[in-house]
Image: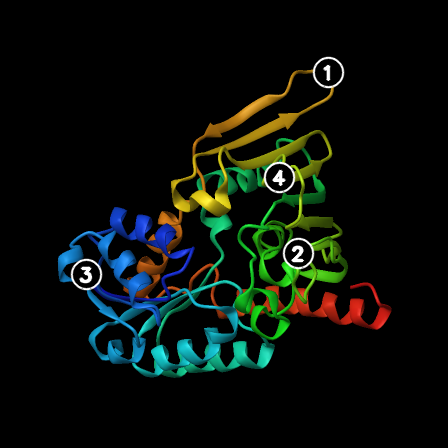
Amino acid sequence: MNKHRLGIIGCGWIAPFHVAALNRLSDRAEVIWTADPDRERAAHIAATLQDAGNIDVLSDYRDGLARVDAAIILVPHHLHHPITMDALRAGCHVLLEKPFAITLDEADDMIAEADAQGKTLMIALPHRYRVSTQAFKQAIDSGDYGRLFMLDAFMDEDNREYVTGGWFVKKATLGGGVFFSASAHMLDVMLWIAGEVQSVSMVGAHAGIPMEGEDTAISVIKFKNGVVGTTRHTWFSPAPDRWYVMRAYCERAVITLTVNPLGKLAVEGYRCPWQSRITVSQPGSADKVLLDSDEGLDLTEEVRHFFDCVDTGARPQTDGQVARELMKVVLDAYQEAEIKGAN
């Protein structure tokens, strides 16, 4: 199997997570260059990769597209569309950080271009690729605990040291608020487990982060199979307790997935230690632990899946159509909230 020649476009906060995955998958890809308008950031990311001495540092990604067959794109949300289109037209397979795009028209452009070029387009929605999330879904799907009837998810974050200005505080560049930018971590897993959405609504609040979009959001979802779901998400928690909790309410048990950084994620990034746990609560017995691990925001399996799809031609689990449907759920909820004054 030949190694893929890879370029990394965008060298901000999330890039070290991808670097850690690529270093574990060095048999699958060779990073040829890193690119960022801030050359110092690009140089820093290049220095953390295996074979760092042979990696070029670019300030303009377009100077390197002809030399690679795949690109990982990790840029501000409003740049997803133009940069992905450039990469696809240059003949590159693309792994693109979520959210997919700012508008559905942009998403449709990228899907059509990937199809026209015959290239893999995968959107990085990492939680469904995590071992603990897969085990959570398997426990639900097993039927051992009866029929699923409700999903409830909560992300409890203090991002005041992370959301400090620039593109992140403008709706035109972020795409919205916390619900658009980050609640996808819960929503994608819910849609993966429960299927198509019948209806969705949301309310948002401006708790304290100086940004145009909401920093706190709650949604209510009805799925076509009868399951109901809720998400709750804040970036302004004064005392975060659990970073990510999803509960599946089944007929005979509540299955709980907890993913928790044991340090300050916004500051420590990929170096932050984690605990991931799945427990089952049933009447009349002590909670049963199905999984207890130190798995955190590890992108290895997500990146491996991307390379597998490139090699085999298979459609990624989180391809453009899946990511577009997720975007539509969010944008439909925003549209209703705008009409009702709920956000």
Residue situated in front as seen by the camera: 159 or 107 = 159
x, y percentage for residue 109?
50, 82
Residue at far right of view: 340
Q: Quadrant of residue 198?
A: bottom right
Residue at far top of view: 285
Q: Of the residues under marks 4 and 1, which one precedes in the sequence?
A: 4
Kind of residue at disc 1 = Gly
Residue 312 in sight from this viewpoint: no
* Image quadrant where one finds the N terminus: bottom left
Q: Which residue corresponds to mark 4?
A: 245
Residue placed at 53% from the left, 27% from the top?
Answer: 290
Q: CA distance from mark 2 to mark 1?
A: 44 Å
Instruction: Name the side, left or right, on which 108 lies relative to 10.
Output: right
Q: Of the residues under marks 2 and 4, which one precedes in the sequence?
A: 2
Kind of residue at disc 3 = Lys
x, y percentage for residue 282?
69, 23
Mark 2 or 3: in front is 2
Residue 215 in sight from this viewpoint: yes
Residue density around tag 4, few if under 14, some if 14–19, many if 20 or more, within 10 Å: many
Mark 2 or 4: in front is 2
Q: Give the secondary structure at mark 4.
A: strand
The answer to whether the residue labelled 3 contacts the one labelled 1, judged by CB atoms less than 8 Å apart, is no
Q: Of the residues under marks 3 and 4, which one precedes in the sequence?
A: 3
Residue placed at 28% from the left, 57% from the top?
Answer: 44
Residue density around tag 3, few if under 14, some if 14–19, many if 20 or more, within 10 Å: few
Q: CA distance from mark 3 to mark 1?
A: 54 Å
| Colour convention | rainbow
Q: Which residue corresponds to mark 3?
A: 3
Q: CA distance from mark 2 to mark 3?
A: 44 Å
Q: Which residue corresponds to mark 1?
A: 284
Q: Which residue corresponds to mark 2?
A: 209
